[in-house]
Amino acid sequence: MSNRIGVFVDVGNQFFYANKKWPGKKINYQRYYDQAETLGHIQRAFAFGTQIDNSAAKFAAALTHIGFECRYRDIDRGKWYSWDVGMAMEMVRCCEKLDVVVLGTSNYTMAHVVKYLRDQGVKVIIMACTIPKELRDVADQCIEVTERMLENGS
C-alpha cells in the first residue's frame, strides 16, 4: 500500500531562500510535486503565498494546474504576512488522513508542528531550500532542494 502524502509549501519562503542561494532562480513546482510524488500517493497539496493586487494570479493558476490547492492572501505594499499558523492548522486538520507530510519551508518555527505531527504517528519530510538545524533535528527526513529542482535546471 502506498503512503498517503500531504504536501504543504510556503512559496514565499521558498522563493526567498532559493533566490538567496541561487540569485535569479526559482523553484520549478512541477519538479517539486513530482519529487514529492515519489514518496507515495499525494492526497492533497497546498501552496501558501501572498500577493499584491492579484499579482500572483497566473502563478497560482499554474500551481493549481500542477495539483496544488492555493491559499493566497492579498497584502498591501510594504506589508508582510506569515502563513505559519495557517499552514500548521491545515496540517493538523489533514494529519489523520495522511501517513507522510512533506513540508516546504525553511522557517525554524515550524519545528513545533513537526513534533506534533510526529507524535500523531505522521512521518514528516522537510523538502526545502536551506533547511535549518531546528527542522533537521525534528524531521524524519530532509530533502534539500537542488539545482535540478529549479526552473531551467538540468
Image (tube, rainbow, N blue to C red):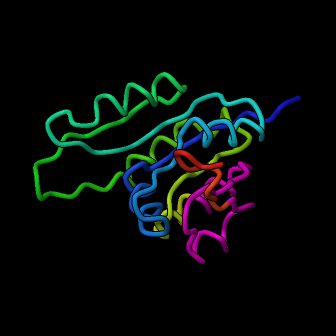
- Residue at image point 14% right, 57% down: 79
Count the marks: how many?
A: 0
5, above or below 139, in the image: above
59, above or below 147, in the image: above
Residue that extends furthest to the right in the rendered view of this protein:
1
- Horizontal side of 46 relative to 128 (left or right) equals left
Q: Provide residue 12's location: percent of width, then percent of height.
A: 37, 52
Q: Provide residue 4's location: percent of width, then percent of height.
A: 73, 33
Let me know if residue 41 is in the magenta part. no
- Residue at image point 10% right, 52% down: 77
Q: Nearer the viewer, residue 27 or 11?
A: 27
- Residue at image point 69% right, 62% down: 142
Quick one: quadrant of the N terminus?
top right
Residue that extends furthest to the bottom in the rendered view of this protein:
133
Q: Provide residue 15's location: percent of width, then percent of height.
A: 41, 55
Q: Residue 37, located in which quarter of the rendered image?
A: top right
- Horizontal side of 125 relative to 60 (left or right) equals right
83, above or below 106, in the image: above
- Residue at image point 65% right, 71% down: 136
Q: Nearer the viewer, residue 25 or 27?
A: 25
Q: Residues in magenta?
A: 114-143
Residue that extends furthest to the top in the rendered view of this protein:
65
Q: Residue 95, located in which quarter of the rendered image?
A: top right
